[in-house]
Image: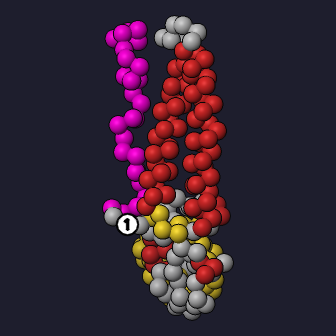
Amino acid sequence: MSKAFTKESDDGDEDDLPDDVGGLPAGAKNYMTPQGFERMREELMTLMRKERPEVVQVVSWAAANGDRSENGDYLYGKKRLREIDRRLRFLSKRLERSEVVDPAKRPKTDQVFFGATVTYVNSKDEERTVKIVGVDEVDPGRGHVSWISPIARALMRAHEGDAVRMNTPGGEEELEILKVEYI
């Protein structure tokens, strides 16, 4: 079928995808560190107060120029508005379900809970450090892992000096916890 006879919404966008995709188990709270919560809230505010109004202004200007079917500013602007609105819905729902847990306020302990920075050594004598954070804060490059990840689940509730077992695709691996901090 010719593009000339299709509706704007027929272009294959994923507007019908659920807004709350990936990460959290059904019914689970969205645990976050205060820094992660603030980053998401800042993104939400930037989208609402800066980006969306700018795009609306461009779309209004482009719509006033006449023929919208071949108007790139109008078509791209409408697509960008849909992306922004989808991200706004996602961020709003995530922040609404979030429970902020400040690891710095935790009583001193050597047991691993949410927000802990854990240094461990694996069976290959490789020392690694990970911080257990919320699903929206994951950053493997900085060693931030989700509280629902296999490594975090293996480490949770263990104490400094404990050895824990973690199932990996290559088989079971033993990890020895060297240090637990809450920073």
Badge 1 element: loop
Q: Quadrant of the N terminus?
A: top left
Image spot of residue 13 (x, y percent): 42, 30
Image spot of residue 7 (x, y percent): 37, 17
In the figure, 170 relative to 9: above or below? below
Looking at the image, which is closer to me, 29 or 46?
A: 46
In the figure, 51 relative to 43: above or below? above
Task: Kindly indicate the quadrant of the structure image that contains residue 10.
Answer: top left
Query: Hey, what amino acid is under mark 1?
Result: Ala
Reply yes or no: does residue 30 show up in magenta.
Answer: no
Give me the residue at 41% from left, 8% from top: 4
Label 1 sits on residue? 28
In the figure, 161 relative to 7: above or below? below
Q: Quadrant of the C terminus?
A: bottom right
Give me the residue at 33% from left, 62% from top: 26
Labels in figure, total:
1
Reply yes or no: does residue 10 show up in magenta.
Answer: yes
| Dominant secondary structure (helix, strand or loop) of the stretch shown in magenta | loop
Image spot of residue 40 (x, y percent): 57, 55
Q: Which residues are magenta?
A: 1-26
